Image: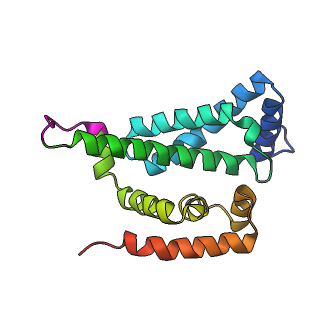
Amino acid sequence: MSETSSPTDDLGVLAERAQGGDKNALDDLLRLVHPRVLRICRSVLPYSADAEDAAQEALLNIATKINTYSGRSSFSTWVHSVAANSARSTYRKLKRSAQAAHNPETMDRPDPRTTSVIAGTRLDLLEALETLERDRPQMVTPLVLRDVYGLSYEEIAAEVGAPLGTVKSRIHDAREVVRPLLRPKD
């Protein structure tokens, strides 16, 4: 990194070089974003091995889909989206596996991987996001980027390619849908 550039600038430069076919730049880029991607996945998936699997999937997606990064938003914002989508995708796969594995007729002893998903502290949020995705899919990414990862409205607007007012409206509406789903059940 140079003294006058920020880490985000350096990621953008590496991303451009990787898009141009520079394999060393892609390797450097993946090495640099790996800790961030793993942190994002761990914030959603309670079991460390599951988070690591999701992070590897996200890194593979970054490597294979680097040419889809358009530069509308910062590269780190794009990485957030890819990692969040990977974590949610991994969660859905584990949930389906857990539902199949917890069939009382076939259950011998609990699998710690599926049990961790069921007992995970973020289960209510993930269930709420699944409901939102089923009913209003265009609202999920803005809500996750704002309320889970803390990105600015401007960064989110650039990432999803929507006007700032639309993003704010989607986040507001998504919160209205999700809020009752997150309230403790009496």
Name the residue located 24 percent from the left edge and 39 percent from the top edge.
101
Q: Is residue 1 visible?
A: no
- Where is residue 61? Give x, y as percent: 62, 35
Q: Which residues are magenta?
A: 105-113
Name the residue located 81 percent from the left edge and 25 percent from the top edge.
21
On screen, residue 156 versus residue 122, left or right, reads right
Front one among 138 and 86: 138
When asked about the image quadrant of residue 30, the answer is: top right
Vertical placement of 11 versus 25: above or below?
A: below
Vertical placement of 175 versus 58: above or below?
A: below
On screen, residue 177 versus residue 13, left or right, reads left
Q: Residue furthest front?
A: 135
- Where is residue 22? Give x, y as percent: 80, 24
Name the residue located 54 percent from the left edge and 65 percent from the top edge.
136
Q: Is residue 106 magenta?
A: yes
Name the residue located 38 percent from the left edge and 70 percent from the top edge.
181
How many numbered marks, from 0 up? 0
Q: Residue furthest top?
A: 23
Q: Is the image coloured rainbow, by chain, by secondary structure, or in one colour?
A: rainbow
Q: Is residue 108 magenta?
A: yes
